[in-house]
Amino acid sequence: MNLLLGIFFILSISSFPSSQAGKAVFTGGEVAPTNAAIYQTFVNFTAATGEEQYIGVFTAGNSLASAASTGATLVRRLQKVYGAKKVEWIPFHKDNGTTCTDPALLAKVKKLTGVFLNGGDAQFYIDCFYKNGKETASLLALQDRYHKNKLAVMGSSAGTLIVQSTPMLKIRESYSSLVYGSSYTSTGGFKLLDYGFVDVHFSERARQGRLIRMIEDLQQYSHVGFGIDEDTAMVIDGTKFKVVGTNGVYVINTDLAKKGTGKRFNVTNVRANYLTNGDSYNFETKAITIPSFKKKITSTVQKNTPATMTDDVFQPGMFTLVTQGLFRSKVSSQTYGYTKETNPRFELDFRKTSSSAGYLGTSGGVEYLSYKNLYVDVYCVQNC
């Protein structure tokens, strides 16, 4: 990114108030249709704005036909299952000739109390709601209503990726990001989340490496990134979010990290926090709150076996499995994982310190394990 673009982004981000306003349900994608804790929360938010409930569904499918089909499904779900009074699919897809500069779309946005941003291709949202690098009137109206608590937003997959103020990640995955650097858009997102980078399908697609690299490459914007797992949501209310759903949300922080020199990417002292159902996080203070049904993991419940390691750390779900296992171990304070790829090959070291803590509890018959302040080092070990 050149200097002028960097200055543009810093100015555009600073134009928003430092306090996060609004209510939102940002998910990592693949939300089960029966996940009432997520859908019902969003519908309830849209009914509590003081205006007549009216939800607009936006879909970014690869064709107009698929977008329309998905839109119809979501409309039916929000109305018939979760009780929303008025829901409308609002087409903006390039195939139908309607653009986000249409005054009719602006008029609708000004009446909406809820916006559902579904997945697909995030670039469709950018191409429509930005013109010549500037927000359209429809996007400005959406931002204004959200920050004034007149409109709640739900995002899924690409619809969540689009909400950040920072540049957005593109397709490049973890290993390729470590080797070649981050791939990201030249514009920010919808500027609904002002506190860091956002990534989706996180544990399921092992995107920890790409988010770490993104934060380090673009740390002038933020030292914090949020990685949301599938069927899981960050439920935002003002300056805090609560985790709701079946999996978790990573909060990656690099404010204490040290980036090394050399041909290959390397960094030490990255802090990883993995928050699961019921945990909450304060954007401004960075404080994490664990609910009472989870208890701090102590030696009385830990296993007297070493933590496992892996030779394929970016296999789907493996990063989470290995790091959670470290907190279950009584005898291990650290473990590690290699990338499957060997030209070059990277190693990720995971360390518990005196500030690290794991929490374990059961709710609704499901066991949840969260942890705070796991230290991660990333460096090249072969064919560097």
Image: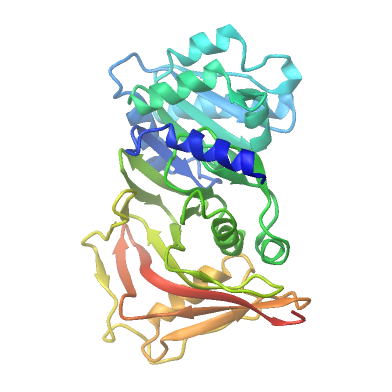
- Residue 55 vs 312, above or below: the answer is above
* Residue 70 appears in the rendering: no
Asked if residue 276 lies left or right of residue 208, the reply is left
- Residue at (69, 50) in percent of width and height: 171
* Residue 380 appears in the rendering: yes
> Measured from the top left, where is residue 170 in percent x and y?
67, 47
> Measured from the top left, where is residue 276 in percent x and y?
38, 59
> Measured from the top left, where is residue 69 in percent x and y?
65, 27
- Residue 208 vs 192, above or below: the answer is below
The residue at the far front in this view is 3
Q: Quadrant of the C terminus?
A: bottom right
Q: How many numbered discs, if any? A: 0
Q: Nearer the viewer, residue 74 or 349?
A: 349
The residue at the far left in this view is 292
Indicate how the structure is coloured in the image.
Answer: rainbow
- Residue at (39, 80) in percent of width and height: 352
Asked if residue 288 lies left or right of residue 326, the reply is left
Q: Nearer the viewer, residue 383 or 145?
A: 383
Q: Quadrant of residue 89?
A: top right
> Measured from the top left, where is residue 129 in percent x and y?
60, 24
Q: Nearer the viewer, residue 248 or 367?
A: 248
